[in-house]
Image: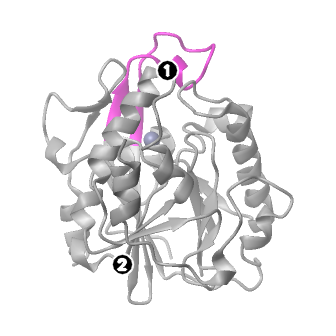
Amino acid sequence: MEASKHTRTAVVSPLPAASLSSCGTVSATADVKLPNPARAGFADKLYRLDGGHSLANDESVWTPGENVGRSIQFSSTCWLIQRENQWLLWDTGVPESALNDPKGWSTLPKLIVYHLDKTLTDQLAEIGLKTTDITYVALSHTHGDHIGNVRLFADSTILIQRAEYEWISSPDGPNDNVNQLKALARKLMGTPKHLRLLDGDTDVFGDGSVTLVSTPGHTPGSQSLMVHLKKSGFIILSGDVVHLEENFEKDAVPSLNTDKAASIASMERVKRMIATYKAKFFINHDKAETDKLKLIPAFYD
Ligand SMILES: [Zn+2]
């Protein structure tokens, strides 16, 4: 319903021709946009930020056929990348208004409740940054726990797949949970002042240091991110291409995902990339794994 409004008011900066691809479909030529591992440039630092955590009452939504009625905790993770004097924030977590609220905050009240122990603003301040210092905010997709604070970054350029942005304003489908998530996404996104809609894989800085990788399936325009660091090598940040390490091993697809075949193809694509780039893989919502990773002000370089 808001498609025309979004289209009319969005400021869409054209990408250089070299970054344009026809669409986000998985094909034999899709990897052409990815960096040459031997020649990719480097980002300087990668910081993890705590974007909240959640408790869901039925794990089987994420692991169909297994764990029915079992509760599960997820992490919500945001990442900050420094490349020279530019900063890129990957996802924005649970809304800051949920801070220390014992009732929590929800995207789907019957299924999942989120809690926030520290704000992004305070975590950025730990290394001397303000929200206005962030050059780019790249969004893996438009679920509320990933775009909860996107409006704090009104001066930043928002990087999102065109397929994702158009999807949240498309007509409702048969899955009411998905419809609710889309309505919440429209509300949280608002109308960004600086919006760059992407068509598939995108080399953000033009040197292979930070690449947004098209991994549709969880939502129509989901993406992952690959960063290249001098000491740590390549690291792939999952977005929600997968929620749990075990699902990644089994190619298990959550029932909320909009496209099962695309979800499997995207997981397989990430597995190939992990092999090609000898990459580490950080899974956003896998709390047991995430809790072991460095947290701001510590960083990977
Ligand atoms: Zn998520």
Q: In the rendered structure, are the residues bearing label 1 and label 2 in contact, judged by CB atoms less than 8 Å apart?
A: no
Residue stretch rendered in magenta on the structure:
53-75
Image position of 120 (left or right of 160): left
The x and y percentages for residue 56 are 38, 24
Of all residues, the one furthest to the right in this rendering is 28
Q: Nearer the viewer, mark 1 or mark 2?
A: 2
Q: Name the residue beneath numbered marker 1.
A: 59
Q: Is residue 223 visible?
A: yes
User: Which is more N-terminal, label 2 or label 1?
Assistant: 1
Q: Quadrant of residue 55?
A: top left
User: For the point 70% across and 44% down, which residue is it?
Assistant: 267
Q: Could you tell me the amino acid type at mark 2? A: Thr
Q: Quadrant of residue 207?
A: bottom right
Q: In the image, what residue occupies the spot 23% across and 47% down?
A: 95
Query: Would you say residue 233 is visible in this rendering?
Result: no
Q: In x, y percent, where is residue 269?
A: 75, 52
Q: Amino acid at mark 1?
A: Glu
Q: Secondary structure at mark 1?
A: helix
Q: Which residue is mark 2?
A: 135
Residue 70 part of the magenta segment: yes
Is 98 a magenta residue? no
Quick check: 133 left or right of 62?
Answer: left
